Amino acid sequence: MTQFRPKYITFDCYGTLIHFEMAEAATRVYGAQLDKARMAQFVTNFAAYRLDEVMGDWKPYNEVVHNAVERTCRRNGVTFKEEDARRIYEEVPTWGPHPDVPAGLAKVAREIPLVILSNAMDSQIMSNVEKLGAPFHAVYTAQQANAYKPRFQAFEYMFDMLGCGPEDILHVSSSFRYDLMSAYDLGIKNKIWVNRGHEPANPYYQYTEIRDISGLPGALGL
């Protein structure tokens, strides 16, 4: 990895850079109704339904969250209220970075252009990006690509916009299911997995592992 100097470092945003608080948001809404075990099951189902919701044709992210919350409530015998789903969705722009992110990003931003490819709406994400404390060459969203990751279309849109190919980038993510599996299939050979602890290691997908973004400069030999 230290011998490779990419044209761009591309990042997943939520979970990798921004502390992704969907589980906490759901707990704030439903925790008073559910005991600890049932809340844990609710959170697990909510994550699974969000993934399922982004696998088809693009729809606004508020609909992704609404549908996932509704399906999760149905599965867990919880009364669904539209305002609860809206409350969870409206939290997203308020979330900030993991503590390790600003300094790690600032160091690599001095050497290599940074790019975000995110499963977000245009109206959401800039509030989060502004909290990252580093300049970004470009921020691409699912809304712009008309597709969510892990669909290849989202990555292909980014390649087209950057005028580069899989061989030109280093992709950084904490998620195999949303990012690194698709990156592998698309021929992105240079990948970094940020082990945030929310998915198990999967060496088949050929990546460099770092604990957090503070390890990114070292992985690049900076």
Image (tube, rainbow, N blue to C red):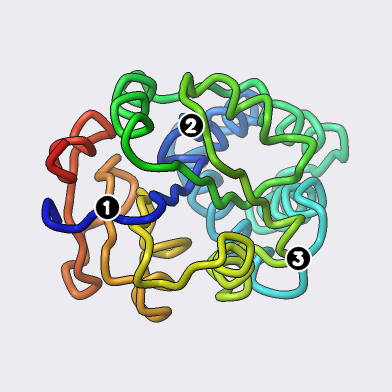
Q: Residues within 10 Å of mark 3 (few under 14, many from 20)?
A: some
Q: Earlier in the sequence, mark 1 or mark 3?
A: 3
Discs 2, 1 touching: Cβ within 8 Å = no
Q: Amino acid at mark 1?
A: Trp
Q: At which x and y percent is residue 80? A: 81, 44
Q: Which residue is mark 1?
A: 193
Element type at mark 3: loop
Q: Which residue is mark 2?
A: 18
Up-down: is 200 above or below 137? below
Q: Amino acid at mark 2?
A: Ile
Between the residue at mark 1 and the residue at mark 3, the CA separation in whole angstroms equals 25 Å
Residue plotted at (36% across, 79% down): 187
Between the residue at mark 2 and the residue at mark 3, the CA separation in whole angstroms equals 22 Å
Q: Which residue is mark 3?
A: 146
Up-down: is 52 above or below 88? below
Q: At which x and y percent is residue 100? A: 30, 23
Q: Earlier in the sequence, mark 2 or mark 1?
A: 2
Q: Residues within 10 Å of mark 2 (few under 14, many from 20)?
A: many
Q: At which x and y percent is residue 59? A: 81, 61
Quarter of the image with the C terminus is: top left
Quarter of the image with the N terminus is: bottom left
Residue 73's tag is: none
Q: At which x and y percent is residue 15? A: 45, 40
Query: Residue 222 vs residue 86: left or right?
Result: left
Element type at mark 2: loop
Number of numbered discs on residues? 3
